[in-house]
Amino acid sequence: MTPGIIVAEKAGIDFRIHEYLHDADSESWGEEAAAKLGVPPQQVFKTLIVSTGTGFAVGVVPVSGTLNLKAMAKTLGVRKISMADPGDAERVTGYVLGGVSPLGQKKRLKTVLDRTVDNFATIFVSAGRRGLEIECAPADLASLLNATVADIS
């Protein structure tokens, strides 16, 4: 049980947990998840932490894509952002890299979901550790996170 799963359970949303054997030598955790779950990489989303200079925010984008920092900054209403230092990302979320879930973070951060979530009935995001994914409807995830949906990848 992870904090992310607990949040989903308490909210009463419809979700499924998927577990797979994580390969410690994998170079792309998200691509590994998609392959082992047998779903397109566009349907599996990675959780990225950015620094706004005055705090942190979360971008959730397909594992097959990259975060567009300019688009993310514009969506957040700030001039410039950068990827958070890995240590800071782990500290503010409470999760280790490769297992950062958008759900159940230590501190609720402003979150932006890439608009491509709307292409799927369900999407996969980390459930809070490597080898563990939560599958849910994008609208449920957006509602739980009070997230903005925008073109950020």
Image (cartoon, rainbow, N blue to C red):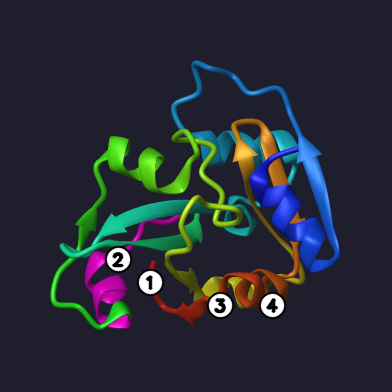
Residue lying farthest top?
25
Q: Are marks 1 and 2 in contact (CB under 8 Å)?
A: yes
Q: Quadrant of the C terminus?
A: bottom left
Answer with the quarter of the image where residue 151 lies.
bottom left
Q: Place residue 89 in its image quadrant.
A: top left
Decide which of tag 3 and tag 4 comes sooner along the chain: 4
- Which element carries disc 3, helix, strand or loop? loop
Residue holding disc 1: 152
> Disc 3 marks which residue?
146
Distance of label 1 from label 3 (alpha carbons): 17 Å
Amino acid type of the residue that numbered disc 2 sits on in the rendered structure: Asn
Asked if marks 1 and 4 touch (Cβ < 8 Å), the reply is: no
Q: Earlier in the sequence, mark 1 or mark 4?
A: 4
Residue 19 disc label: none
Disc 1 and disc 2: Cα gap in Å? 5 Å
What's drawn in magenta, residue-wise? 64-75
Report x, y in % for residue 106. Answer: 49, 50
Marks 2,4: beta carbons within 8 A: no
Q: Which residue is mark 4?
A: 139
Local SS, label 1: loop
Q: Please tell me the numbered disc located at residue 68.
A: 2
In the image, which is nearer the foreground, mark 1 or mark 3? 3
Q: Where the N terminus falls, by quadrant?
A: top right
- Decide whether residue 67 is among the magenta residues: yes
From this viewpoint, is residue 15 visible? yes
Q: Is residue 83 left or right of residue 37?
A: left
* Cα separation between marks 2 and 4: 22 Å
- The answer to whether 24 is drawn above or below residue 80 in the figure is above
Instruction: Pick the residue in front: 38 or 83.
Output: 83
Q: Is residue 44 above or below residue 91?
A: below
